[in-house]
Image: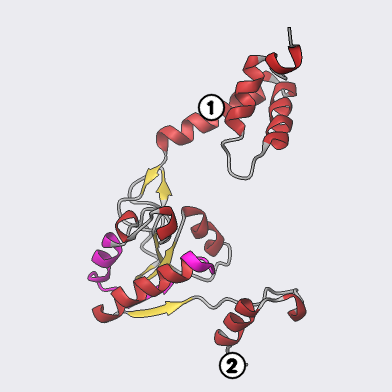
């Protein structure tokens, strides 16, 4: 009998836990093992609290019917906030991008979450994104659309595509400036980053 090839490395329940953790983005075999054994060492109530939090989020979180951000109330807190400017909409790829922009405390308009970006290689086209509902919102007195898609190939392609659709509607379309991060050295910036930094320059 060959125990090395036939027997699992861990007990079956542990193997299952590791396999499920590996489904999370950025989690490989070793990290999944560390997380699994951390949960096993944790107090039962702490481990079950995580289980309850995941179950609660899956049951209560939904898409906002207006902007498609994730929320537990519909419409979401941004769309229902009368203090925000409904004439300006910031378009982002994913719900977590909203949180990143909100941290600046600078933007006072509304959001629109595309739930992805154009990616022909992955089979993601315009019909797979929340573009139709964005176009519908423009007719409700919107004066500016800020395209805040990610500064990569997919994000740039999405921004260009949206700009072509939106400009004929008479709305101002702007793109967030991107470039050299604060605190970094210019010698480490690639040419695309430097191009965006020069392109997005502002007066002193």
Label 2, secondary structure: give it: loop
User: Which residue is at a point 75% across and 16% down the rendered structure image?
Assistant: 4
| Badge 2 or badge 1: first in the primary sequence | 1
User: Which residue is at a point 64% across and 27% down the rendered structure image?
Assistant: 18
In the image, residue 58 lies at what x, y percent? 44, 34
Quadrant containing the C terminus is: bottom right
Label 1, secondary structure: give it: helix
Magenta stretch contains residue 135: yes
In the image, residue 126 lies at what x, y percent? 32, 61
Structural crowding at the residue carrying mark 1, measured as other residues with C-alpha within 10 Å and reported as few (<14), some (14–19) or many (≥20): few
Q: Which dot marks residue 113? A: none
Residue lying at the far front in this picture: please name it.
Answer: 1
User: Which residue is at a point 49% across and 59% down the rendered structure image?
Assistant: 98
In the image, residue 105 lies at what x, y percent? 55, 67
Residue 121, picture quadrant: bottom left
Q: How is the image coloured?
A: secondary structure
Residue 117 horizontal side relative to residue 12, left or right: left
Residue 173: in sight, yes or no?
yes
Residue lying at the far bottom in this picture: please name it.
Answer: 203
Q: Observer-nearest residue: 113 or 14?
A: 14
- The magenta segment is 132-154
Q: CA distance from mark 2 to mark 1?
A: 51 Å
Residue 16 horizontal side relative to residue 164, left or right: right
Q: Are marks 2 and 1 in contact (CB under 8 Å)?
A: no
Residue 148: in sight, yes or no?
no
Q: Observer-nearest residue: 110 or 191?
A: 191
Q: Which dot marks residue 203? A: 2
* Residue underneath mark 1: 52
Is residue 12 shown above or below 109? above
In the image, residue 102 lies at what x, y percent? 53, 62
Magenta stretch contains residue 108: no
């Amino acid at each position: 009998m060959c125990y090395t090839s036939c027997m699992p490395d861990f007990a079956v329940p542990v193997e299952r836990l590791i396999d499920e953790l590996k489904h999370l983005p950025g989690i490989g075999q070793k990290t999944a093992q560390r997380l699994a054994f951390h949960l096993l060492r944790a107090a039962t109530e702490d481990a079950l609290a995580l289980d309850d939090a995941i179950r609660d989020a899956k049951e209560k979180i939904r898409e906002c019917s207006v902007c498609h951000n994730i929320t537990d109330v519909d419409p979401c807190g941004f769309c229902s906030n009368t203090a925000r400017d409904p004439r300006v909409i910031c378009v982002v790829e994913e719900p977590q991008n909203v949180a990143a922009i909100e941290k600046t405390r600078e933007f006072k308009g509304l959001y629109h979450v595309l739930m992805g970006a154009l990616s022909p290689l992955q089979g993601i086209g315009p019909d797979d994104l929340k573009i139709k509902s964005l176009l519908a919102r423009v007719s409700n007195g919107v004066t500016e659309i800020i395209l805040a898609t990610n500064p990569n190939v997919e994000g740039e392609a999405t921004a260009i595509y949206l700009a072509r659709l939106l400009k004929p509607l008479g709305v101002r379309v702007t793109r967030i400036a991107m470039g050299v991060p604060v605190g970094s050295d210019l010698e480490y910036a690639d040419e695309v980053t430097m191009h965006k930094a020069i392109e997005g320059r502002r007066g002193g």
